[in-house]
Image: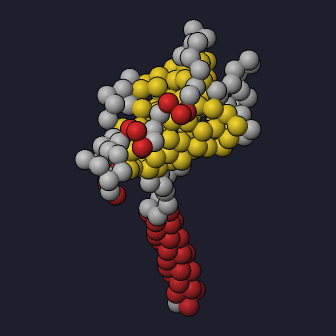
Amino acid sequence: MLARFSRFSRAAVAAVVVVSSAASAFAVTACGDGGGAKSANVKSGPMPENEAWNGVYFHPVYGYLHLIEEGNNVVGRWKRADQSHWGELSGTVTGNVVHFTWKEHKIGMIGASATTHGKGYFAYKLDPEGHAVLDGEYGLNDEEIGADWHNVKQARMQPDLKSIGGDAEGAPPGGF
């Protein structure tokens, strides 16, 4: 009888260990995704030959994005095509990828809701026809992903950061 009890005990202990391990694995999986901000899982590669980040890029909603590379950093500004917002970004370049933070300002509005911010990334690529494009995403607040942002580099356009943003874009300070 002791032998039967012993076999039963070992089987019961083994079953408890298996169930306990499975429950722990489930708990780790369930908790592992909930707390942190979402980041892009994008690998950098070499920059395409004879290409540079400097330039003006177009998106039908976000308008013209002016980018300037300064060492391993990129800064940029854009004004939406409908003239309702202007934005600015800055980020760090690794090969053909830039991870950036951004702010966008609603023109004519003041206060906390006038500015949104977040993070994003672009991967610099050549499309099948050989045109330079920025493929990326942006997210709100601490998120780096969430919405697509695809831009096409414009030929014969020079970036001019000073042409976008500043006090002249919104309501003058103290004025109506």
User: Would residue 145 be visible to someone looking at this image?
Assistant: no
Q: Is residue 34 above or below residue 149?
A: below
Residue 86 at what x, y percent from top left?
41, 37
Question: Residue at image x 50%, y 30%?
Answer: 163
Q: Is residue 125 above or below residue 4?
A: above
Would residue 45 appear left or right of 58 to someone viewing this image?
right
Name the outermost residue toward the top: 129
Q: Is residue 19 above or below residue 73?
A: below
Name the outermost residue toward the front: 175
Residue nearest the observer in this picture, 41 or 46? 46
Would residue 45 appear left or right of 171 to someone viewing this image?
right
Residue nearest the observer in this picture, 107 or 64? 107
Question: Residue at image x 46%, y 46%?
Answer: 103
Residue nearest the observer in this picture, 27 or 67? 67
Question: Residue at image x 29%, y 49%?
Answer: 175
Would residue 142 appear left or right of 61 to someone viewing this image?
right
Residue 77 at what x, y percent from top left?
51, 35
Answer with the quarter of the image where residue 79 lies: top left
Question: Residue at image x 35%, y 42%?
Answer: 170
Q: Is residue 32 above or below residue 76?
A: below
Answer with the quarter of the image where residue 122 lies: top right
